[in-house]
Amino acid sequence: MLTKQTPSQALLAFNISNIDSLFPGFATGDFAVFYGMPTVLPLSLFLAVRAQLPFQLGGLETNVVFVDGGNTFRLYEVSRIAQLHQLDPREVLERIFISRSFTAYQMTSIILERLKETVNRLGSKLVIISDMAGLYLDKDIPAAEAKDVFNQLTRYLSDFAKENQVATIATYLPHLYSRRNTFFHTATCGRANTVISVRPTRFGQELVLEKHPTLCLGRARFPSQHLTLNEFMES
């Protein structure tokens, strides 16, 4: 029997049994980092749809703010995920508010100057920062400047999530190795209270809970990386 949850108790869950056993879900107030394989991108879109579900179904009953760093939003994937949840794709897309940035300077402005006002106006309880580091890896931006600004962003997002009781999930997509990339990754994971990675295994992929304030850390297997999106969502 389903029990009605209050918003303060609600968790944004994957609704995949072995994953949920390890990690019941993202709470409002979390600043979480999701990194590893490219799978983290469709999974963030999956969460953007599930966040709109009722509390008792593992959602947050909320609009979603999607800060798109590097043109990563995939409209057709979101529509397919909505259909798999028996939701109207048009209505789901209308509740995802996208702020696109094509330069690091635009990304900084969106987060530091406009994010709080947007969240308050929409009453959103989920913010997704997609490909958080990508734009700051641009070699045209001096390394010292990029590191200073990125440090400021991670501090801001950590405080923002707690102060506004908004689940804030940053996806950190794979990028070529560099000292700057290593610095950004360390800064992001260091400021987050929840760190989750997706890693390859001999039999597919696994989710690894690397950092959490209360849960036991561990790993759980995802469906095979060879599954289609539809098969993955139905697993």
Image (cartoon, rainbow, N blue to C red):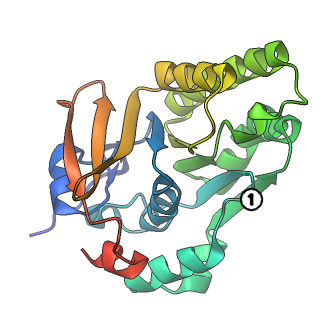
The quarter of the picture where residue 96 lies is bottom right
Which image quadrant: the C terminus? bottom left
Most extreme residue toward the front is 202
> Residue placed at 51% from the left, 87% from the top?
88
Task: Name the foreground residue: 119 vs 133.
Answer: 133
- Check the image and report above or below for 235 versus 221: below
The residue wearing badge 1 is: 71
- Check the image and report above or below for 191 versus 1: above
The answer to whether residue 178 is visible is yes
Residue 75 falls left or right of residue 84: right
Question: Is disc 1 surrounded by few (<14), some (14 to 19) or many (20+) residues within 10 Å?
Answer: few
Give percent across and percent down for residue 59.
37, 61
Q: Helix, strand, or loop for circle 1?
A: loop
The answer to whether residue 85 is visible is no
The quarter of the picture where residue 56 lies is bottom left
Residue 205 falls left or right of residue 79: left
Give percent across and percent down for residue 14.
32, 59
Kind of residue sitting beneath label 1? Asn
> Residue placed at 46% from the left, 49% from the top?
37
Residue 180 falls left or right of residue 91: right
Most extreme residue toward the left is 1
> Residue placed at 47% from the left, 41% from the top?
35
Task: Name the foreground residue: 52 vs 14.
Answer: 14
Number of numbered discs overlaid on the protein picture:
1
Which image quadrant: the N terminus? bottom left
Task: Name the foreground residue: 218 vs 214.
Answer: 218
